[in-house]
Image (spheres, coloured by chain):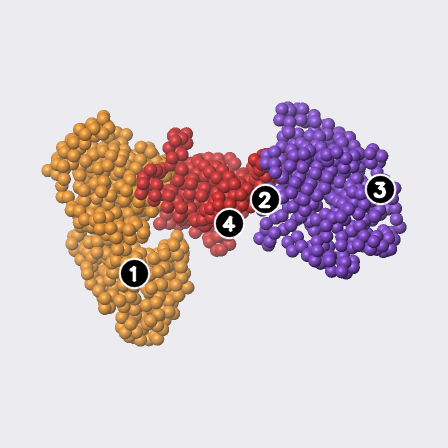
Chain colours: A purple, B red, C orange
Amino acid sequence: MTELQKTPARAAAPAGGGEPYLSVRDLRIHFDTDDGLVRSVDGVSFDLAKGRTLGIVGESGSGKSVTSLGIMGLHRSKRARITGEIRLDGEDLVAAGPDRVRELRGREMAMIFQDPLTAMHPYYTVGQQIVEAYRVHHPQATKKQARARAVEMLDRVGIPQPDRRVDDYPHQFSGGMRQRAMIAMALVNDPSLLIADEPTTALDVTVQAQILDLIRDLQEEFGSAVIIITHDLGVVAELADDILVMYGGKCVERGPAETLFDSPEHPYTWGLLGSMPRLDRELQERLVPVKGTPPSLINVPSGCAFHPRCPYAALTGGRSTEETPGLTEVAPGHHAACHLALSERHRIFTEEIAPRL
Amino acid sequence: MFAYIIRRILAAAVLLLVVSAVTFAIFFLLPRLAGETVDQLATQYIGKNPSPDAIAAVKKNLGLDQPLYTQYWNFLKGLVSGAEYKFGPEPATCHVPCFGYSFKNHLEVWPELSKRIPVTLSLAIGAATLWLVSGVATGVVSALRPRSIFDRISMGIALAGVSLPVFFTGALLLTVFSYEWPILDNLQYVNFTDDPLMWARNLILPWISLAFLYSALYARLTRAGMLETMSEDYIRTARAKGLAERKVVTRHGLRAALTPIVTIFGMDLGLLLGGALITEQVFSLQGVGQFAVQAISDNDLPKILGTTLLAAFFIVLCNLVVDLLYAAVDPRVRLS
Amino acid sequence: MRRSRTVALTATAAAAVLVVTGCSSSTKSTDAKSTASGSATEAAGGSGANAATKGIVNASDKKGGTVTFEMKGTPDSLDPGNTYYAYIYNFSRLYGRPLTTFQPGAGEAGNKLVPDLAESLGQVSADGLSWTYKLRKGLKYDDGTPITSKDVKYAVERSNFAPDVNSNGPTYFKELLVDNPTPYEGPYKDKTGDLKSIETPDDTTIVFHLTHAFADFDYLVSAPQTVPVPQAKDTGAEYVKKIVSSGSFKFESYEDGKQAVLVPNTNWDPSTDPIRKQLPDKIVLRMNIDQATIDKDLLAGNAQVDLVGGGVDPQTQAQILQNPKLKANTDNAYGGRLVYMAINTDVAPFDNIECRKAVQYAVDKVSVQTALGGPVRGQVANTVLPPDIPGHQDFNVWETKDNKGDEAKAKAALKACGKDSITTVLSARTERATEVAAATSIQAALKKVGINAEIQQFPQGKYLADSAGAPKFAKEHNIGLMMMQWGADWPTGYGFLQQIVDGRAIKASGNSNLASLNDPAVNKLLDDAATNPDRAAREKIYGDIDKKVMEAAVYVPLTDFKVFLYRPDNATNLASTPAFSGEYDYLNIGTTK
């Protein structure tokens, strides 16, 4: 598992030491729809310090993107109900007014989206869009300064001939270049928190690694806190210090990346690991996806939301269908929400799961 | 960009040529195929007592006895360089662009037709401004507050506007504001250059009734377009930058939502410049549309032909402008 | 007596005008005007509904103001030599004086022909072939140049002999006047020659030489085609833009299809003109106005006259009829027009009079009248000649009870014709909704007696040229019955009847004798009338012709067309004249506005 070894610099960063830069407590984001109340995020908590990277993993609809948009304050619909706490550098964003959040948005926290083609405005040049992002938060900057800054950022993210490409339109860029430009746009104001929502999903495999490298390099350079949202454990394996696994709007397992990869506690995490292609292992027959479909967020299964798909639900003596499991600490900093007895879990993992990984 | 413009202009010119050929064929070839003789055509130039020598004279004067392709060629030549006909004491020059002579009063078509253009232009431009501003504004506000009271009321009005024909709203406005409470009575077209205030005063009712129909349409179009654009990823990006919502809406949302509206606007304006038949009729505005209606009811072929070509010209012109505008607005069009 | 008073009054009124222009709306000028009009009232008609069909309503000599005429569509031309509409015949007299014209007046009085440019009606030679007119002395155009008889001759030449330039008007003169040995080609092609059969021995005398006697010639020269046109000023088709005036008003501006503005002609001398008054300061003719707008403008007094004179819109009519106050300002006048159905004697079995009788009896005229818009739009007719044409006699050859048709009589006639049923085609003009409605009503009535008529519609522009009016086409397509309307070019029996009953008038195209009636007795009566110098005798003959035609059962008169006109309060001198299809006489309309 060499590639999972973190660089010394990163490992040296404070893990939960002192006041975390971002602190999320019992975050709930519910949407009132005509079909009923959608509990997209239902009580998620985590902390993130500057210089650290958190990977949020889960299937589509698990609530990971909703969480990130919630942090950014981008749920504008009147039907969205957000409760809990999102503390950014000590300031509660849930309680803050929308204008205050807007001020912070783009300056203190920035976001990179999944598909850079649709995420950039087709009618404006890449430069114009970066300049715009810069000038929102630097109103005193002249157009010239802003443009110089845009060129500088494009250069930083590795776009060749940035002074010429700055006047190109997004459609004139290749996919990877566009994502680089997106990153340049996100980092133009030196944000302390960067949220990357599936930053590589829409890209070619060869480009994916480059972009991940870029994010890692830039993080080292800027020392910001990073949240990587992905359904692909491989991505977080590259980058994350800590990992948070979401299922049905809830956090089912959370912990340092090493421990989570070495000894995952939750059957859903096992499933995710099983579906992850790995270069360091002989390919087992075939990848095993997590069986079944993600749960409805309107009628979340009673008890443990994962129980209809969990092969070991029967081993809980019926608790999984009746009682919602809470997060319990299984190792220092490592939490999991599962009714299975600890010993049972470890036995299943070592006997049944680990050999197949 | 320059090459693109040249290409578009050339295409427009070719299109006009095709339109002229088709119109010419419809008016002069089809009746012939349907069995109308040249004599019958010539008879239409003559009043109620066509004598054989009069028919012969008209055929000779207008070249109706020549083969059709020669006639078409002469027609094109007339458009470009004028023509000469023998009417009255002296040979009459039919000035460029020569659309020929009216069946009914033997006057040149173009001078009469061109006098109508300012009326229609005034009507169309004024109404278009009105409907574009009010329609788009209503649409945007509705889209930003979907299902709000404003949205519901304005979309209700829009539905009414789309369903109410001009001859109803126009007649209603006319009855109310010109006759019941004569605030705007005695409406007659006044040249803008003569008296801009009277020009606007006398056109305001036609503008409103025409704009009502269209702004309703545009409000609905804008609303739909805005709702769609505002859910685009790049809007989310714009918000993520920390842009104020107003800027997100105008610079990012509206800009993209307007593009298809500009296309439709160009078509609508082009069509309208070819004559706003009903509005001109209701308000007795002597514009191109009324000219066309009159020409049709008189069976005045050259006038009909002239109006058709003028209308086609406006449509082609407006489409050309739209294409160029489109290229200016959307960089993807320009370069591909 | 009458003439001198007019002169005196005109002088006073002219002074008033000067005052008005001097200080736009002082009470003083109003006083002066009302005094003028107060003393001027003559032969005033009363007021109330139909008052203007009996006398002149709002008779006044009050000068000043703007009289606005509005019209739906455009006229064929304002050029007196290039028009065929009664309302332009009527209107053109404001700026052009024909040799004779009709005296402004209502009913019978309006049919009276009086000399206009000429000092008296025509002098006819003993053989009836030469008509001589003497022009009045001191006649001038609006530019001050004198009017000569040569200009009248030229006007007739340009209007009748240049069909490729001035094509709209009728060509009665061409058909009646002796042609040159080599056919005359008109003044535009033949620039040096002229028509020898019009002589102008001096500047005030004009003599017409006819190919055959024509008693109605005085009526013929009342057409605007005799309005003088100076050859030097004639620009052919463009003349309409710069018409030289010989009447009491002249053109200030003319915009084709938009409007014409007339102002008083200062070179018009009232002493040469017993009938014109020159009242308003300005006459505006607005074209292409929506009929609903015209009606509203009339009701609001914004316009004084609907030029076309076809009556108000059905909605306006309903609105007016419900309001007694508005109704008092209306005239429901005969329009000098017959709505009828022709029975084509060319198409079997209508060559048999018994079959024609069956149709005559079968038609329910009351329901046809309803289809045509009710009594306001026409009165049930049983004769070809309308009641407002001199010579009209009341009779009813094919009488049915209450004009509602008689199935029994119709079936009996059908039997006499040797038929149980007939299948035929009934033609009507597509654009005329009421005509189609009337045809539908007739179709239903015919069906009851066993006559199956299929209605076929044709565009009106081609109705006479290519379909109903083309006997060959009609015969081939079994068109046995044809809807039609007919008005006279001048209000005499000859003017009304000749084109539709004379067997010699049948043409291969543009035929108006839709019945293809060619009865030698009728033809002869027409000739008799044409040559008979005695008016009363002529009028009796017209009645006889009417009777003969009705006895031949070739035309089914349906209704005598009526118009429903509205008189604005502020319009003066309104009289509905039968000489111009029931329109108001446009010569002396003024305004109190």
Real-space CA distance between mark 1 and mark 3, rounded to the nearest whole angstrom:
99 Å
Question: Above or below — where is C310 with respect to A170?
Answer: below
Q: Amino acid at mark 3?
A: Leu
Q: Amino acid at mark 1?
A: Thr
Chain letter of mark 1 equals C
Label 1: which residue? C370
Label 3: which residue? A4
Of tags 4 and 1, which is closer to the observer? 1
Real-space CA distance between mark 4 and mark 2, rounded to the nearest whole angstrom:
57 Å
Q: Amino acid at mark 2?
A: Ser
Of tags 4 and 3, which is closer to the observer? 3
Res. B58 visible in picture: no
Label 4: which residue? B26
Chain letter of mark 3 equals A
Q: Amino acid at mark 4?
A: Ile
Chain letter of mark 2 equals A
Circles 4 and 3: CB distance less than 8 Å? no
The 10 Å Cα crowd at callout 1, few under 14, some 14 to 19, many 20 or more, is some
Label 4 in the same subunit as label 3 = no
Q: Nearer the viewer, residue B137 or C530?
A: B137
Q: Quadrant of residue C539?
A: bottom left
Q: Nearer the viewer, residue B169 or C375?
A: B169
Label 2 in the same subunit as label 1 = no
Relative image position of residue B44 (x, y in whole percent): 41, 48
